[in-house]
Amino acid sequence: MEHIINLTKDNIQQVVDASMDNFVVMSFWAQQQPESVQMLQVMEQIANEQAGRFILAKVNCEAELEIANYFQIQSLPTHLVLSKGQPVDGFAGTQSAAQVNELLNKHLPAMWVQDLNAAKAILVEDKPAKEKLEEALALLKSAYAESEQNGAVALVLVDVYLQLGILADAKTLLETIGLADQDSYYQNLKAKLALAEDAADTPEIRQLQQALDQQPDNTDISIDLAKALNQANRGEEALESLFVILQKDLSAADGKVKQVFMEILTALGQGNTFANQYRRRLYSLLY
């Protein structure tokens, strides 16, 4: 169901049914009542800003008098908050957007819950594409910040990091999970991280690391190692190893170090936390 609808006798049962799972705000108005028209515009703006948090059901009392009478509406504008088929709150007269939000926040789930649920819906899809996982990542980062680092959100965020191969972020965040949230989901993610880290430590990487230990100034080996690390989803380590060289010489290996550095940044994408950090660090060297 859309988040803004016109309530009529034909769809009222559908709206009541929808209120079993979602909050519905009924807005009673009439064209001949300017204050109700103005208040309706405020409600539409709030509904659009919070799309999906509640359903705004607009009741034109001039056309739907029976509905207005059923809910015993005495004056306009009037608003009712509906949950599980029953009014649980409401207000008559005009209110500011801030006042409306204060009332809604008493009953509606926090905005971050909506983002969390949207991200979970993506994860239950069968093999979600990288673009969808990145969409879930953005939703979860917002939810994690707004929820003041809620543990349940953190676990889902770790899950997405692992699916995207962002192991460093997954490990860092997993280490912050408190005992209260270390459930079976946490244990599952911890096991997945361990397997991913083992898979990322390839014989090629170990061989290149040993070679670099013996020839620490060999930029060709450093470049090969960075490429291998990035291929194994260890992009942060790859960027760090190259950045150390760029700090000393931006044109190292005739610019090849910088070129590979930029290629890894591009491959990691705009949504990657560490890529954005290293992009800013590179710009600080350039400018």
Image (cartoon, rainbow, N blue to C red):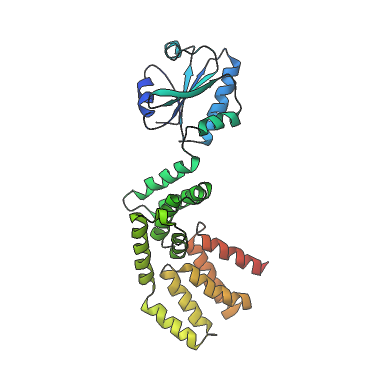
Q: In which quarter of the image is the C terminus?
A: bottom right
Q: Residue 251's spot in the image, x, y percent? A: 61, 77
Q: Look at the picture and state if 101 lies above or below 218.
A: above
Q: Which residue is drawn at 65% across and 69% down?
A: 285
Q: Look at the picture and state if 199 lies above or below 187.
A: below
Q: Residue 94's spot in the image, x, y percent? A: 59, 21
Residue 257 in sight in this render: yes
Q: In which quarter of the image is residue 13?
A: top left
Q: Quadrant of residue 71?
A: top left
User: Residue lying farthest bottom?
Assistant: 214
User: Residue lying farthest left?
Assistant: 126
Residue 255 in sight in this render: no
Is residue 127 shown left or right of residue 167? left
Q: Which residue is drawn at 46% across and 65% down?
A: 168
Q: Look at the picture and state if 115 lies above or below 226.
A: above
Q: Residue 228's spot in the image, x, y percent? A: 43, 74
Q: Look at the picture and state if 227 lies above or below 29.
A: below
Q: Quadrant of residue 66?
A: top left
Q: Residue 279's spot in the image, x, y percent? A: 58, 64
Q: In which quarter of the image is the N terminus?
A: top left
Q: Residue at x 53, y 46 (%)?
A: 146
Q: Which residue is drawn at 44% across and 84% down?
A: 210
How many numbered dots are placed on residues in this image? 0
User: Residue lying farthest front?
Assistant: 179
